[in-house]
Amino acid sequence: MTDDIHALSGAYAVDALDDLERGQFERHLAGCAACRAEVASLREAAAELAAGVELPPPPALRGSVMDAIGAVRPLPPTPVAPVSTGDGDATGPGDTRLPSPRVAPGSTGPTRWRRVLVAAAAAGVFSVAGVGIWQARDDGPAPTLAQQVLDASDASRASQTLQGGATAAVVRSPSLGRAVLVTTGMPAAPEGKVYQLWLQTADGRMASAGILPAGADQVVVLEGDARTATAAGISIEPAGGSTQPTTEPIALFSFT
Amino acid sequence: MARFSVVPSGDGSSPEGGAGPVTPDAGETLADLLAQAARGDEGAFGVFYDRTSARVHGLVRRVVRDPAQSEEVTQEVFLELWRQSSRFDPSRGSVLAWALTIAHRKAVDRVRSSEASRGRDASYGAAAVDVAHDHTSEAAVGRLEAERVRRALDTLTDAQRRAIELAYFSGYTHTEVASLLSLPLGTAKTRIRDGLIRLRDTLGVTS
């Protein structure tokens, strides 16, 4: 992210991005509530422009359209989303910064993570919002699992801004039982380390949900059952990953 | 970054709300009609078509320019709106913006793909004359609305207005807009965004 990606919101709203930029911006949108709201409002403004160019189609087109829809079934509705509020890009206080790896083996574990979670929640680090402010677009290829989660109408999202402006958002769909991590602008992990992903199970254990692939902007489906998980986290671990977190999390996302 | 809450700017039934001009006093909102369509009510979709087709077709025609292709794209758009009718979420914006977003995207896709296949040859340029705007008959309500939009456009700087017109009505990417207006790379997107924000605020489409 050399440029300020937020500045693409206007061009995105009027389809003035090339395919590459559009993909980048849509990944950014998944984790940026402010941009989603802005795109929605700018699309309303752009739609007003069309008022100046109204032109009724030839009358015969109506018959063609009605014939065509008779041969196609409307898509089923997506499940009703729970009401959620808040903007999803809260910037957390101290504990969302990328830590220098202050590894303290033996002193970490589920209990400690829970404490961090509780403290962070109390500090208002988390906010959850419905995802998918941008409306469903026309159909393309069959959506990937990640896209299905991002588009799910029951998807909720918790996002954080990390040190250096990187963002990480976890989008979870209870109906699909999966969660997706969307990162933008992630710096490379320290030499010999990886970003490892975690889901906290209902009994408080941290279960590995995979390793974040290298690269600044990623969309990754977390391994494991996100339906019953109570939180997700990211920690810096030795290459190859750990069976349990050995460092303090750089990001935590509470589902409760 | 400031937060904005989106207020639907018109659903087809409010006289001043950017609605379709044909039957502004019909009791059902566009959202109602769409909900009925989602349950398979073709008649309701026909009414929806009657109230939105001038807006959709006008936009498509302005972008695509070729009349026959514009009709094709307009039909594709309405088929898509029918298919997606259950997926519209009123909490995320107005029906009209949703429909026109889909229409604009399809129109732009058509222009870019046909240009790619034609290699931007001269015959395209010859065909690409400006579409005459139909302000004559059906668009009485539309005329008032158009006047409101024209006044809002007047509040933009020339550079903002030209950048938006090239992007929205001609379907150019912001990079192409920068080149067409001899702007430094990266500045066209800023003009587009600033101009749209100004339009939005002037037209009062959000609170």
Image: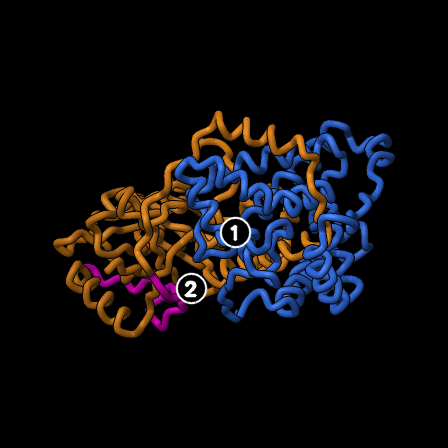
Chain colours: A orange, B blue
Q: Position of residue B11 (x, y in %)?
A: 53, 55
**Magenta stretch holds residue A170:** no
- Is residue A246 positioned above or below A72 on the image? below
- Is residue A121 positioned above or below A56 on the image? below
Per the rendered image, the range of residues in magenta is: A84-105
Frontmost residue, A251 versus A105: A251
Contact (Cβ within 8 Å) of mark 2 with mark 1 = no
Q: Amino acid at mark 1?
A: Val
| Drawn side of residue A10 relative to residue B34, left or right | right
**Of all residues shown, which one is farthest toward the left?**
A203
Q: Residue at x 66, y 67 (%)?
A: B198
Q: Residue at x 86, y 32 (%)?
A: B122
Residue at label 1? Answer: B95
**SS type, badge 2:** loop
Q: Residue at x 58, y 65 (%)?
A: B205
Q: Mark 2, chain letter?
A: A
Q: Residue at x 25, y 56 (%)?
A: A231
Local packing at callout 1 (Cα closer than 10 Å; few below 14, some 14-19, many 20+) is many
User: Could you say which quadrant of the image residue A169 lies in?
Assistant: bottom left
**Label 2, label 1: how far apart the Cα atoms are:** 27 Å
Frontmost residue, A82 versus A62: A62
Q: Position of residue A28 (x, y in %)?
A: 49, 53
Disc on res. A89: 2
| Drawn side of residue A212 relative to residue B63, left or right | left
